[in-house]
């Protein structure tokens, strides 16, 4: 159930308002001047997006994702877009033949529209391409800074809006205002959701895409970490998947850890220098991006279609994949055992604006704040039948005492927030000893590991896997135990400088408790670089453990 939250500010007395005015007005004024939500870009200035590979035969793919301009832009309002019927999204693997036929028909019609029509699959895919491959520059800022909707708090609301209009377009093409997307329930490890939904594998239908990885066709279970070695038994993959769900959704309880960190106008993902800078959330970095990797086709350049952001949305499975991402956002908000969780409330988050096309091919301006209540948008999800399995997953520890003494004896370096001789190159794996905060953890805070300033050229897929208490962890270290912290799956794409510079954060208090080393002053953190490319150079700037607000 959702209830409006009242804040103490509702009851402030007149006197306190007056004194507040004198003390804090200049501060507020400053804050107003500083407020910088992302605005919709100037669509007349479109850049041709590109992505290139670093190894193998060098290739650069140019994506002309420029969007048709159909003015004037109208503002979204709940009144104007009142849902005629509820959109109840259900799991794809349980859909009836009748519903699948309808779904196919809708995509058939969408594919048949001319490329100039904003409702065509071509333009729908270009919307995604242009806001993740540097197709447009941020408006109202100094310098040429690409607009990027991944790797920050915008990931979830932007994609929610994207699905919202996509669903309305499909519905209007088949004349069914109640048409609802089906979600690919890849977190379901019990009833068959963890395979590519069969409906998408039917050759010669509108749901089929031949650029998909052959090795993960059904009945193969799709792993939820792209670091999973091939040829593992089904039961191991299932436990790894449950642990990935647990670590990415259950223990990532804050908006920052789960949704991602702040991104304001003028910030440049490819060129950030602030140590506290961009941060993708656990749902995006881990689970979501692993699916992109596994569906993408390694026979093509840059894992087309799903495996790079420039082409991902050309595959209709993209929209079912993202429906599950969107569903998990709801599950995280409302269905966790410890109670309701909360989205970001920062005005630069709430007031950010994006542009989409509606079912009448009009351009619509939307705000993040209007996307935060899915049911208000008319979108409902059937409760996942197997959610409780990962919500209640209890990862077993594979170690039971601190690995610090062994690591010290073996010369494993100490790494703090100060850089160790500049940046640290991870190679294929790297271990370090990291100090925990010396004061006791306040009950309202979480203990969080920050892998600071991860830098990588986003030219190929690469995964950064993190463990605690396993010195010399490597590619084959199992990820079903309490020592596993998470995976940052880096999907290829291309910004101006083709570099990503972000932080990666994991809640680690739960892990330390399960291992039984939560009284130690220091812990061993290990990072493993794996995935498609072994010669990707990945560097970090530091490792820091801190208490962060819930
Ligand atoms: Cu915009 Cu799944 O990515």
Image (cartoon, rainbow, N blue to C red):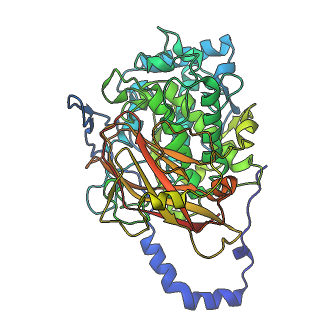
Quadrant in which the C terminus appears: bottom right
20 left or right of 544 in image: right
Q: Classify residue 211 by image quadrant.
A: top left
**Relative to 534, is 403 above or below?**
below
224 left or right of 212 in image: right
- Please give the count of numbered marks on the rendered protein: 0
Q: Quick one: which residue is furthest to the front in this view?
A: 409
Q: Quick one: which residue is furthest to the left in this view?
A: 58
117 or 295: nearer the viewer: 295
Q: Classify residue 302 by image quadrant.
A: top left
102 left or right of 464 in image: right
**Relative to 272, is 316 above or below?**
above
Residue 96 in the image, given as x and y percentages of width and height: 69, 14
292 or 309: nearer the viewer: 292
Residue 198 in the image, given as x and y percentages of width and height: 59, 15
**Relative to 141, is 78 above or below?**
above
Asked if one can make out residue 199 in the rendered structure from this viewpoint, the answer is yes
Q: Classify residue 47 by image quadrant.
A: top left
Residue 503 in the image, given as x and y percentages of width and height: 44, 57
Q: Quick one: which residue is furthest to the top in this view?
A: 204
Please name the residue shown 63% across and 23% down the image.
Answer: 92
């Amino acid at each position: 159930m959702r209830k409006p939250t009242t804040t103490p500010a509702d009851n402030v007395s007149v006197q306190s308002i007056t004194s507040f005015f004198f003390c804090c007005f200049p501060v507020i004024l400053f804050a107003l001047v500083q407020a910088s939500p992302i605005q919709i870009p100037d669509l007349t200035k479109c850049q041709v997006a590109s992505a290139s590979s670093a190894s193998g035969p060098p290739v650069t793919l140019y994506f002309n994702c420029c969007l048709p301009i159909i003015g004037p832009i109208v503002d979204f309002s709940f009144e104007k877009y009142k849902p005629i019927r509820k959109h109840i999204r259900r799991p794809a693997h349980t859909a009836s033949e009748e519903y699948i036929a309808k779904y196919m028909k809708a995509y058939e019609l969408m594919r048949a529209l001319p490329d100039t029509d904003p409702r065509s699959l071509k333009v729908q895919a270009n919307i995604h391409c242009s806001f993740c491959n540097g197709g447009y520059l941020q408006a109202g800022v100094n310098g040429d800074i690409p607009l990027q909707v991944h790797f920050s708090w915008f990931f979830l609301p932007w994609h929610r809006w994207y699905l919202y209009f996509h669903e309305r377009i499909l519905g209007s093409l088949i004349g069914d205002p109640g048409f609802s997307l089906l979600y690919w329930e890849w977190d379901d490890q019990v009833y068959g959701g963890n395979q590519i939904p069969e409906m998408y594998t039917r050759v010669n239908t509108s749901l089929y895409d031949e650029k998909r990885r052959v090795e993960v066709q059904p009945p193969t279970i799709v792993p939820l970490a792209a670091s999973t070695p091939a040829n593992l038994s089904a039961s191991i993959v299932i436990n790894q998947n449950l642990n990935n769900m647990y670590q990415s959704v259950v223990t990532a309880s804050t908006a920052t850890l789960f949704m991602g960190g702040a991104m304001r106008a003028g910030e440049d993902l490819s060129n950030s220098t602030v140590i506290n800078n961009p941060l993708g959330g656990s749902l995006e970095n881990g689970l979501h991006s692993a699916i992109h990797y596994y569906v993408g086709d390694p026979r093509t350049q840059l894992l087309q279609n799903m495996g790079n952001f420039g082409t991902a949305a050309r595959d209709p499975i993209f929209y079912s994949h993202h429906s599950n991402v969107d569903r998990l956002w709801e599950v995280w908000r409302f269905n966790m055992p410890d109670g309701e969780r909360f989205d970001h409330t920062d005005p630069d988050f709430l007031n950010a604006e994006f542009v989409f096309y509606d079912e009448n091919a009009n351009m619509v301006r939307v705000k993040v704040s209007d996307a935060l209540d899915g049911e208000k948008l008319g979108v409902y999800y059937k409760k996942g039948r197997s959610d409780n399995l990962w919500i209640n997953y209890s990862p077993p520890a594979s170690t039971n005492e601190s690995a610090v003494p062994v690591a010290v004896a073996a010369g494993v370096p100490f790494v703090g927030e100060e850089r160790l001789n500049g940046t640290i190159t991870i190679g294929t794996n790297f271990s370090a000893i990291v100090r925990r905060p010396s004061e006791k953890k306040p009950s309202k805070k979480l203990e969080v590991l920050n892998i600071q300033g991860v830098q990588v050229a986003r030219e190929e897929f690469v995964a950064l896997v993190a463990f605690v208490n396993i010195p010399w962890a490597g590619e084959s270290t199992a990820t079903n135990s309490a020592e596993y912290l998470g995976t940052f799956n880096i999907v290829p794409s291309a910004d101006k400088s083709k570099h990503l510079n972000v932080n990666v954060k994991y809640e680690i208090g739960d892990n330390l408790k399960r291992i039984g080393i939560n009284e130690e002053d220091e812990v061993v953190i290990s990072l493993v670089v794996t995935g498609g490319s072994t010669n990707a150079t990945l560097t970090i700037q530091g490792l820091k453990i801190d208490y962060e607000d819930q």
